[in-house]
């Protein structure tokens, strides 16, 4: 994704070498894209040698955020960015929709909808949303502590 896009925070480090810790992909805003988003996320996190717990949480968060973008907005595409600023894993999903007031956390939802953000809230260390600017939708983001796989260097657990 080009510098200056809505998914890149204003103070992100763009120095040489940092791009290997940023990955972005766009998918059509269709229900079947949720599975594709999970697979693309899993592949990138495996390449980054992310620990199992962090990887599983991140895949679930991506799944929930992409699902919300597909179900609750009038988008034609969804953009997902994964990055590793400092010791964190940051997930950002941008839609093109116009959801008034942005996403809302519902602590007591008995119906099928409304539990996704509760999972995101539980599994992430922080999350939020902001307007993407230029009437181009909304970005919903979540962060997790980055946990590197201790056994990725060839060592195997006993």
Image: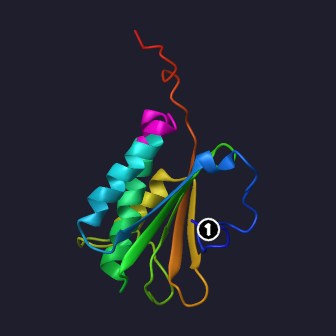
Q: Nearer the viewer, residue 60 or 81?
A: 81
Q: Toward which corner of the image does residue 67 lie, by quadrant?
A: bottom left
* Residue 62 in magenta stretch: no
The residue lying at 35 percent from left, 86 percent from top is 74
Residue 108 in view of the camera: no
Q: Nearer the viewer, residue 33 or 19?
A: 19
- Is the stretch drawn in magenta largely helix, strand or loop? helix
Q: Quadrant of the C terminus?
A: top left
Query: Where does residue 141 sit, x and y in percent of width and height?
Result: 54, 65
Describe residue 4's horizontal placement relative to residue 130 as left or right.
right
The residue lying at 56 percent from left, 69 percent from top is 128
Residue 27 in view of the camera: yes
Tally of marks: 1
Describe residue 139's horizontal placement relative to residue 65 as left or right.
right
Q: Quadrant of the N terminus?
A: bottom right
Query: Where does residue 93 sit, x and y in percent of width and height?
Result: 48, 67
Q: Nearer the viewer, residue 36 or 119?
A: 36
On the image, numbered disc 1 is attached to which residue?
2
Q: Callout 1: few (<14), some (14-19), or many (20+) C-alpha neighbours within 10 Å?
A: few
Q: Nearer the viewer, residue 61 or 109?
A: 61
- The magenta-colored residue range is 46-55
Query: Where does residue 43 sit, x and y in percent of width and height?
Result: 39, 44
Q: Secondary structure at mark 1?
A: loop
Residue farthest toward the top in the current orientation of the protein: 158
The vertical placement of 114 against 64, above or below, is: below
Q: How is the image coloured?
A: rainbow
Query: Where does residue 37 sit, x and y in percent of width and height?
Result: 35, 58
């Amino acid at each position: 994704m080009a510098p200056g896009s809505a998914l890149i925070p204003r103070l992100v480090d763009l120095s040489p070498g940092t791009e290997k810790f940023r990955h972005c992909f766009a998918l059509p805003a269709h229900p079947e894209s949720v599975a594709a988003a999970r697979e693309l996320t899993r592949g990138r996190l495996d390449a980054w040698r992310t620990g199992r717990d962090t990887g599983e949480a991140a895949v679930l968060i991506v799944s929930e955020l992409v699902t919300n973008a597909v179900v609750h907005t009038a988008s034609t595409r969804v953009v997902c960015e994964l990055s590793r600023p400092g010791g964190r894993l940051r997930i950002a999903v941008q839609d093109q929709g116009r959801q008034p007031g942005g996403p809302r956390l519902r602590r007591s939802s008995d119906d099928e909808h409304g539990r996704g953000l509760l999972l995101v809230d539980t599994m992430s260390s922080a999350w939020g949303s902001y307007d993407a600017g230029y009437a181009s939708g909304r970005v919903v983001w979540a962060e997790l502590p980055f946990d590197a796989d201790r056994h990725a260097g060839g060592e195997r657990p006993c």
